[in-house]
Amino acid sequence: MDDEHIHLVLNNYYTLLDRVDVHIKNLEKRYTDKITCKKGCDACCKFLTVFPVEAFAISVAFIKLKKSIQKKIEKKIKNQGVCPLLIDQACTLYSARPVICRTHGYPIYMKKEGETFIDFCPENFKGITSFPKDALLSIDQLNTTLIAINQHFIESFETDLDLPDRIPISEAIILEQKLKN
Ligand code: SF4
């Protein structure tokens, strides 16, 4: 699949990533001294599964990595507890990381049985007891958008492969290759 076609099937997903990144950048400006997330802090980088559209974006970025890095990642796949993309405490596909990795640690909110729950990494926002609404990401809204984008991706992709609802990162890295065959 050429770059133009790839960009076409991932266009909606990339637009969502841009929107999430803008929100996070604004938060970082607003709460500069309250956010401790940085390279080397890898507590969130556990085994995770992603939607097929995210898996495809990861696989597209994976094939562009140096072969030596690809090999390091492949060697890490056996360790199910940690994300195989984490090498030397840094994400090897940082710019292609999935949505959850972009929002992790930042304030999100969700509704459960009529109540609103707010969550963020306890290492961040120390001393802050409430957030203005525009500082919060609605995880329900984000998931609804991601599900719709994923559905559109699956429908626009002509393949005989029966894609699962969620794909572990260890399998996501080879999705582009799989879809080609
Ligand atoms: S994709 Fe990158 S940021 Fe996300 S869990 Fe894996 S190593 Fe961490």
Image: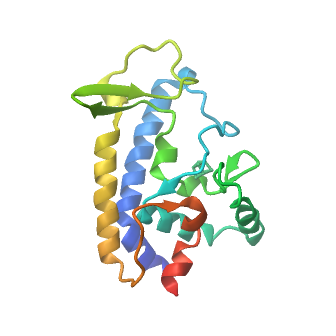
Nearer-the-camera pick, 118 or 62: 118
The residue that appears at 40% across and 67% down in the rendered structure is 10
Nearer-the-camera pick, 86 or 48: 48
The residue that appears at 47% across and 46% down in the rendered structure is 100
Residue 113 position (above or below residue 64): above
Work out whether residue 4 can be spotted.
Answer: yes
Residue 116 at x, y percent in the picture: 29, 26
With 147 as the anchor, is 48 left or right in this view?
Answer: right
Residue 178 position (above or below residue 14): below
Q: Image quadrant of residue 9?
A: bottom left
- Count numbered badges in the picture: 0
Residue 39 at x, y percent in the picture: 67, 40
Residue 166 at x, y percent in the picture: 44, 60
The residue that appears at 48% across and 77% down in the rendered structure is 3
Q: Image quadrant of residue 53?
A: bottom left
The residue that appears at 42% across and 13% down in the rendered structure is 129
